[in-house]
DNA sequence: TTTTCAACTGCAATCGGTTTCGCAATCGGT
DNA sequence: ACCGATTGCGAAACCGATTGCAGTTGAAAA
């Protein structure tokens, strides 16, 4: 919002034309003569004219904006996702309105309202871990704005979903540890509210089961923040029968796990093995680089956004069945197993 | 933009009132009777009414949106900044439109246009390293939209600027290395287009000079990405007379430096000392945690945003002199020196 | 009974860009 | 010179929320 809001009217007045003509001239409408177009463009340029997208959006009922709600931008995963989304959004000539829920249910609700009020044409969302009630999402869907969930998804809503095959990713991780001869494997999972945490835990259990190993409940810890992960890991390491391997389900938990291990002075992978879901840029920070499942942030963002644009492209009354799209997260060899 | 765009008119029709009355009722205008207010609110609720902020914004000529342009969201610094900004933006009841330039001048230009077209009331920006011409910024300022630069700032424009005291931060870093007995200190700086790189280099030079040490130009390397930093560092380490300390000016360069050191199998701080500008969450990933200047991302974001709101609050014709605000980045002791 | 005033509510314009419809001028052809 | 077609442009409505102004109603005061 400027102090110098040059409008179509200003240009029109200067040239003795109508707003309509100026508008058309600027977008090369065939009805307008080349001479007029040229003079209009010249004046627009000299006046430093910028079209008011807000007005345009009001008229079109199209804002050309996609909304994104993430728990937080920190760490490696979500920035990667954002890159992927941005690429697609830009390709379609849209813009991205990014909001953070800070893991708070209330904030998430507010954010949704805000996106609706801003006439976004679609929403990409990864839910906060404190969210247990999903009415705010269904309201938006009923309102007619398509949502695609990614990573931290909600099922059983009329929305598409893009995520990693978490169960098999976790299964493969733990299997890798087992095949390396580890038998006392702990898991540092996240808030079990989240489907993603549940699924990664499920993969862990499946792998152990397959190897005929019992479940040690004291090896299963759940944490929300790196500090908590560090604390829990320290407890694990101080047990009389400590684990010889730790599976961390995210970069967030992993960073806490690693701190605890460092603090304890353990050597990786000699004293203890470590594996998890980590973006490349994160896992290669460590020495040796971690062996980890690539959580495919970039690809998830891209895919989620493409799916969203498919919805937006369609007539909303064509009821598509919600799709569930799984990506495979490849295991990246490091030296931590 | 929805398929179910409930408008004031819909509510008005249902109740046999006018749009005007409904609008006033919803915002508790004193002219409206309590009975009317109540019934309006009830209907609005049941219809799942959401005010169209786009329309409102057009009418008010206030979008309640702040624009943010950053080179990229990756790594640790900018996410911290965004957190700081968000906090303030939310406090003022505004929203944040985040755009990434991806370090490209052209994209940065586009992003600015976009923000203007979206009627943002102010802009926070950290410039791309490929930007050498700043006309796009001055055009925006002339247009009447206030800009506050942070971190990667532009001086001599009519805009406020919030940044670290880079020279003294760098000076202190290098001094720390010197006081630890290191004499062969290399610097891994960024693109020297950027004032921030120049200043951090200047601090480095000053410290050396103060200790009566000559400048070894082969110890000064400049790089844009972690990969480049890794490569350059490897070269440094392979010299016949390699440095015994490295000063990395950002988390981005630091991550490359560290990889090279790890690959070379050197021990920190025994074989080589390392220092830099790193957010806490980043520097404590390493073992030992890095000794580093805190780049104060959160605080910079907060401050920049507060300064911006001061500008927005003022009548734009009250010409304030541009302010330059320095924050001090404290040295965080780790174990890398 | 008339005046006065407060309490409510509606009309219509506004924000800036877009678009439908239609009009006037010009052109080509006969 | 006449007719239909084409070109170039403007008037006005529209998107949805807001607001200055004016109008209506009812009750209290004169």
Image (cartoon, coloured by chain):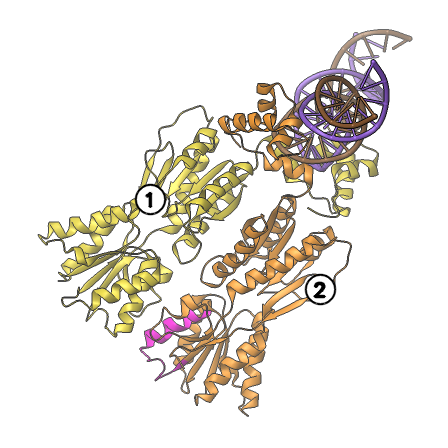
Chain colours: A orange, B yellow, C brown, D purple
User: Left or right of A174: which side holds B56?
Assistant: right
Q: Is residue A252 above or below residue B136?
A: below
Whole-percent x, y for residue A170 in the image: 53, 78
Relative to the observer, which residue lies in front, A191 or B137?
B137
What is the chain letter for disc 1? B
**Residue A256 magenta-drawn?**
yes
Q: Which residue is mark 1?
A: B163
Q: Quick check: do tags 1 and 2 share a chain?
A: no
Q: Which range is magenta?
A: A253-273
Disc 1 versus disc 2: distance between alpha carbons?
47 Å
**Residue A79 magenta-drawn?**
no
- Residue B234 in sight in this render: yes
User: Left or right of B87: which side holds B225?
Assistant: left
Q: Which residue is mark 2?
A: A322
- Residue A194 in sight in this render: no
Residue, x 50% and y 57% (percent of image)? A83
């Amino acid at each position: 919002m400027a102090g110098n809001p040059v409008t179509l009217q200003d240009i029109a007045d200067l040239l003795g034309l109508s707003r309509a003509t100026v508008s058309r001239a600027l977008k090369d409408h065939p009805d307008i003569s080349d001479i007029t177009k040229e003079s209009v463009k010249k004046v627009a340029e000299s006046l430093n004219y910028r079209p008011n997208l807000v007005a345009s959006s009001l008229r079109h009922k199209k804002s050309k904006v996609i909304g994104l709600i993430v728990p937080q931008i920190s760490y490696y995963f979500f920035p990667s996702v954002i890159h992927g989304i941005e690429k697609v959004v830009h390709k379609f000539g849209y813009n991205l309105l990014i909001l953070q829920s800070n893991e708070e249910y209330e904030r998430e609700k507010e954010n949704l309202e805000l996106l609706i009020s801003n006439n976004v044409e679609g929403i990409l969302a990864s839910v906060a871990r404190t969210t247990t009630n999903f009415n705010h999402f269904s309201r938006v869907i009923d309102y007619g704005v398509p949502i695609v969930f990614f990573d931290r998804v909600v099922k059983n809503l009329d929305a598409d979903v893009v995520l990693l095959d978490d169960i098999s990713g976790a299964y493969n991780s733990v299997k890798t540890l087992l095949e390396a001869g580890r038998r006392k494997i702990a898991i540092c999972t996240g808030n079990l509210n989240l489907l993603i945490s549940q699924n990664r835990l499920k993969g862990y259990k499946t792998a152990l089961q397959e190897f005929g190993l019992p479940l040690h409940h004291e090896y299963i810890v759940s944490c929300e923040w790196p500090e908590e992960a560090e604390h829990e890991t320290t407890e694990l390491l101080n047990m009389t029968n400590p684990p010889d391997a730790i599976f961390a389900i995210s970069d967030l938990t992993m960073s806490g796990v690693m701190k605890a291990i460092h603090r304890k002075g353990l050597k990786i992978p000699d004293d203890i093995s470590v594996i998890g879901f980590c973006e490349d840029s994160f896992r290669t920070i460590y020495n040796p680089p971690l062996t980890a499942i690539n959580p495919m942030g970039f690809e998830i963002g891209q895919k989620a956004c493409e799916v969203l644009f498919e919805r937006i492209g369609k007539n909303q009354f064509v009821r598509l069945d919600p799709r569930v799209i799984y990506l495979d997260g490849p295991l990246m060899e490091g030296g931590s197993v």
